[in-house]
Amino acid sequence: MAAGGAAALTFLDQESRVRAGGVGSLQVPAPVTMDSFFFGCELSGHTRSFTFKVEEEDDAEHVLALTMLCLTEGAKDECNVVEVVARNHDHQEIAVPVANLKLSCQPMLSLDDFQLQPPVTFRLKSGSGPVRITGRHQIVTISNDLSGEESEEDGSEEEEAELCPILPAKKLGRRL
């Protein structure tokens, strides 16, 4: 799924989930769940790169949303250039510098949920760090199977409909 594809998904809460087959001729999207986990790594003179990757057999959509890069305790007043290596829309690997941090003028940088598709490698191209990278690992899963609870709920709704039929309105006998 493309990076923009995640925005087009319809997120349904548990109460509004219905069968993937739909109601009548209306097709309802399969239930979608979204989990979000804290992400963090540190680059330094000892650890100059870090790769974030997920299992390829996983059918879920994974997004790494970066929030901030900052120099941490022990950083020198030098330029620390952080580079991200990822794949572009043609699935070619590209390397792009995303931050140039210096203790005396720019010790941190907000990336405002900059979204990347794994695998992603972070490299400390210059400087000795340490540079802390933080963000969120978001996992979007589309489920096509029905749970027992949903099947029971559907059955009880159908029973209620059968118990309470809609009756025609009564006409009043008064005439003018």
Image: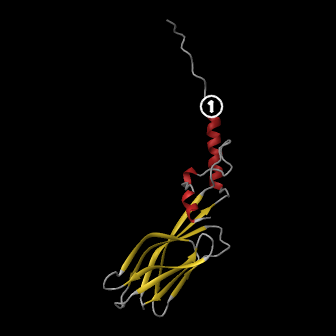
Q: Is residue 70 left or right of residue 47?
A: left
Specify the quadrant of the image occupied by residue 80: bottom left
Q: Return the x and y of residue 15 as percentages of the image width and height.
A: 55, 51
Q: Residue at x 33, y 86 (%)?
A: 103
Q: Return the x and y of residue 144 as percentages of the image width and height.
A: 67, 58
Give the answer, above or below, for where 170 lies relative to 65. above
Describe the element under mark 1 as helix, strand or loop.
Answer: loop
Q: Residue at x 66, y 52 (%)?
A: 20
Q: Return the x and y of residue 126 as percentages of the image width and height.
A: 45, 89
| Residue receiving disc 1 | 165
Specify the quadrant of the image occupied by residue 101: bottom left
Q: Nearer the viewer, residue 64 or 101?
A: 101
Q: Return the x and y of residue 81 as percentages of the image width and height.
A: 44, 85
Q: Residue at x 37, y 90 (%)?
A: 78
Callout 1 crowding tier (Cα within 10 Å): few <14, some 14–19, many ≥20: few
Give the answer, above or below, for where 136 lies relative to 166. below
Color encoding of the figure? secondary structure
Q: Is residue 151 left or right of residue 94?
A: right
Give the amino acid at mark 1.
Pro
Q: Which residue lies most toward the top here?
A: 176
